Image: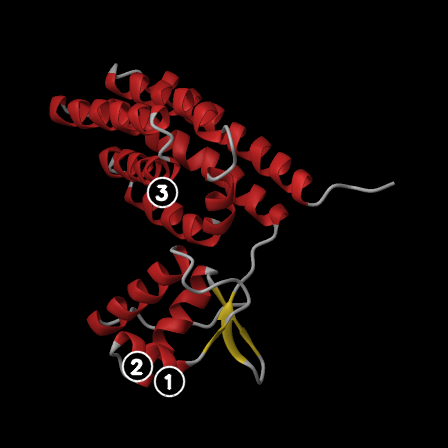
């Protein structure tokens, strides 16, 4: 059960964004304690602002509050990461379809350019660069779609599963698998084909789910 909190004020929104970004970037690791005084010093915010930010991030599922032990970064299990990807599959397919309906000529050019940059990153072995372009592509599709509610939910889900996504992005051979999946999404959106765009997004997230399971099996093999 999450704590209720009023809509965050501007200073609180800034603190929420700063702490969220630090978690997403891996600066705070799963199960790491988050001490209000330390966060206040680091981000230049008052203790009250930090406390309100932690409540907001608890509601988002990025942080958990343990009785008598304060707040810590919530660890997301493989099972939950898979469930998150299943929800993403539905919402991202919706956004891809909406984007295909709304995309402008200028946005078509932007998506095509992103696709070429992703292709170049994979060819050059730039895994980190490709991962960043991957995130940018998904974000732009959400923005182009105009589906703000889905975009907000997807952003929260991305934060919760970011460490699983990063590990997956670093897996040898994964970019070569996901690149054609992303290019298929781009092609369908740019061709104004909503159903094809939705199907391409579903296929990509299905691939993500299978890759998550495979990566976990390699790290934690079952023994008879």
Q: Which residue is mark 3?
A: 150
SS under mark 3: helix
SS under mark 1: helix
Q: Which residue is mark 1?
A: 37
SS under mark 2: helix
Q: Position of residue 45 (x, y in %)?
A: 26, 79
**Which-is-in-front pick, marks 2 and 3?**
2
Q: Tell me the tag on residue 190.
A: none
Which residue corresponds to the image point at 36% horizontal and 42% vertical from the top-left? 150
Q: Position of residue 192 (x, y in %)?
A: 25, 17
Q: Position of residue 184 (x, y in %)?
A: 37, 18
Front in this rendered view, residue 128 or 55: 128
First in sequence: mark 2 or mark 3?
2
Q: Total marks drawn?
A: 3
Q: Residues within 10 Å of mark 2 (few under 14, many from 20)?
A: few
Q: Quadrant of the C terminus?
A: top right
Q: Quadrant of the N terminus?
A: bottom right
The answer to whether the residues at label 1 and label 2 have Cβ atoms under 8 Å apart is yes
Q: CA distance from mark 2 to mark 3?
A: 34 Å
Q: Tell me the tag on residue 41.
A: 2
Q: CA distance from mark 1 to mark 2?
A: 6 Å
**Which-is-in-front pick, marks 3 and 1?**
1
* Residue that lies at the very extreme toward the front in this rendered image: 124
Which residue corresponds to the image point at 29% horizontal and 68% vertical from the top-left? 7
The answer to whether residue 57 is left or right of residue 87 is left
Which residue corresponds to the image point at 46% horizontal and 45% vertical from the top-left? 166
């Amino acid at each position: 059960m999450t704590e209720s909190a009023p809509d965050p004020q501007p200073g609180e929104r800034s603190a929420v964004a700063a702490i969220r970004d630090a978690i997403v970037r891996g600066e705070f690791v799963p199960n790491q304690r988050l001490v209000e005084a330390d966060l206040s010093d680091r981000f230049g915010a008052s203790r009250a602002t930090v406390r309100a930010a932690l409540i907001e991030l608890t509601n988002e599922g990025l942080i958990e509050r343990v009785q008598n032990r304060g707040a810590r970064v919530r660890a997301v299990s493989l099972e939950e990461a898979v469930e998150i990807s299943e929800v993403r599959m539905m919402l991202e397919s919706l956004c891809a379809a909406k984007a295909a309906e709304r995309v402008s000529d200028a946005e078509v050019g932007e998506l095509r350019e992103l696709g070429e940059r992703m292709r170049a990153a994979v060819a050059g072995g730039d895994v980190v660069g490709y991962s960043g372009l991957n995130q940018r592509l998904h974000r732009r599709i959400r923005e182009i779609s105009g589906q703000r509610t889905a975009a907000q939910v997807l952003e929260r889900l991305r934060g919760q599963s970011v460490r699983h996504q990063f590990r997956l992005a670093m897996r040898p051979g994964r970019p070569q698998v996901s690149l054609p999946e992303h290019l298929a999404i781009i092609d369908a959106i740019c061709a104004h084909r909503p159903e094809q765009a939705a199907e391409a997004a579903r296929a990509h997230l299905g691939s993500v789910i299978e890759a998550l399971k495979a990566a976990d099996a390699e790290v934690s093999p079952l023994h008879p």
